[in-house]
Amino acid sequence: MNASSRDYGLTLLRVSLGVMWIAHALLKLFVFTLPGTAQFFASVGIPGVLAYPVFAVELLGGIALVFGVYPRQVSLALAPVMLAAAWVHMPNGWLHTNAGGGWEYPVFLTVASLALWLAGDGALALRTSDRFVPADSTRTAPTRAVMA
């Protein structure tokens, strides 16, 4: 099967997104620590115990994206995690460099994850599936505008 430049572009999106999810998870482990993350969750009204499964979902989801293991489904499953993060950081303003972190980074990761879900798995994916993907995404070629 020949991969197109579109497929390779989606692979770049998938792998870079996976790396970002892994980095986001490892930040919780090595910088904030998991108990510290649990305390933060509790301080914003989220049960602290959820820090542990959130860490696991981010790490395992990121690894799955890097290797292309059901990337569309994984990216769709990860989106609500970052939507919750965006909600938590909303009072801090837009820029993620603001005190307490703004909502720019979580919203970008959410949108990038949804874009991957909508657009496709990319080339070099180990396992793919058509489950939980948009019905029109099985088109093989993108529509092109005709220039007159």
Image: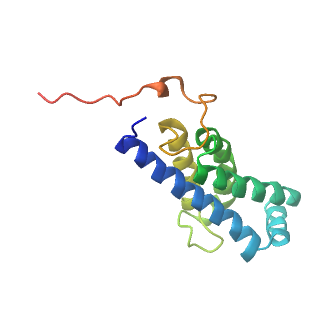
Q: Where's the N terminus, which quadrant? A: top left
Nearest the camera: 40 or 32? Answer: 32
Q: How many marks?
A: 0
**Residue 61 in the image: x percent, y percent?**
68, 51
Report which quarter residue 22 is drawn in: bottom right
Residue 108 visible? The answer is no
Q: Residue at x 40, y 28 (%)?
A: 140
Q: Residue at x 66, y 47 (%)?
A: 78
Q: 125 left or right of 73?
A: left
Report which quarter residue 89 is drawn in: bottom right
Residue extending furthest toward the front: 1
Residue extending furthest toward the left: 148
Residue 36 visible? The answer is yes
**Residue 23 in the image: x percent, y percent?**
63, 66
Q: 66 left or right of 44?
A: left
Report which quarter residue 26 is drawn in: bottom right
| Residue 47 position (above or below residue 128) | below
| Residue 2 position (above or below residue 87) | above
Q: Residue at x 59, y 36 (%)?
A: 128
Residue extending furthest toward the top: 135
Indicate how the structure is coloured in the image.
rainbow
**Residue 148 in the image: x percent, y percent?**
11, 27
| Residue 81 position (above or below residue 138) | below
Q: Residue at x 55, y 39 (%)?
A: 117
**Residue 81 in the image: x percent, y percent?**
69, 50
Nearest the camera: 45 or 15? Answer: 15
Q: 106 left or right of 5?
A: right
